[in-house]
Amino acid sequence: MKIDFTGCDYEAKTYDYADGVTLKIRSFPATEASVRFRDGAQEISGRDMFRQFDHCLTGWSGVVGADDKPLPCTSEVKRQVFDFRNANDNFGALVDFVAVTVAKLGRAEEDTEKNL
């Protein structure tokens, strides 16, 4: 059996998001995942979903606050975006983009492992 970790890393990559906004996103280690199965469905608590969002979104550019000044990509700011994602379409779209990108990264790593 040959094991090749080429392409499997925890480094964030930059993704174009929208209108001059870029996001730095990295994969989420499976060893950190907290998933529970109930009646055949996956259950992830809001706390664990935020922990994944906070870990995976490592930076951004082109994101400004109400005062048009650059908004820092801190855990506190990300928590507000995450907590109010259902009340603001921009927040929800950002959270969804990160989740979909992380899922794609996870599938790419699984495909790499299967091809070993």
Image: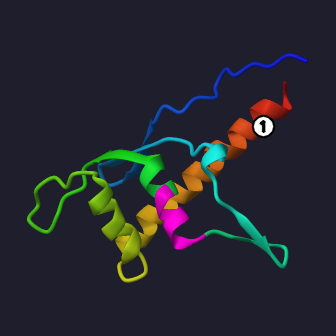
Picture residue at 42% right of the left edge, 54% below the top: 54
Q: Is 68 covered by the magenta stretch?
A: no
Main SS of the magenta segment? helix
Tag 1 secondary structure: helix
Q: Is residue 20 above or below residue 90?
A: above
Query: Which colour assignment does the render follow?
Result: rainbow
Q: Is residue 41 above or below residue 94?
A: below
Among all residues in the image, which is located at the extreme bottom?
Answer: 87
Among all residues in the image, which is located at the extreme top?
Answer: 2
Q: Is residue 104 above or below residue 66?
A: above
Q: Looking at the image, which is closer to me, 23 or 35?
A: 35
**How many circles with numbers are drawn on the protein?**
1
Judged left or right of residue 30, residue 53 is: left
Q: Is residue 23 at all visible to an observer of this figure?
A: no
Q: Quadrant of the C terminus?
A: top right
Picture residue at 56% right of the left edge, 42% below the top: 27
Judged left or right of residue 8, residue 68 is: left
Q: Is 50 covered by the magenta stretch?
A: yes
Judged left or right of residue 113, residue 87 is: left
Specify the segment rendered in magenta. Answer: 45-51
The amino acid type, in three-letter code, at marker 1 is: Asp
Quadrant of residue 43 within the rendered picture: bottom right
Q: Is residue 93 at all visible to an observer of this figure?
A: yes
Q: Quadrant of the N terminus?
A: top right
Picture residue at 29% right of the left edge, 49% below the top: 20
Residue 94, percent from left and from top: 42, 62
Q: Looking at the image, which is closer to me, 15 or 86?
A: 86
Residue 99, percent from left and from top: 55, 58
Q: Name the residue beneath numbered marker 1.
A: 111
Q: Residues within 10 Å of mark 1 (few under 14, many from 20)?
A: few
Judged left or right of residue 68, residue 23 is: right
Residue 5, percent from left and from top: 69, 22
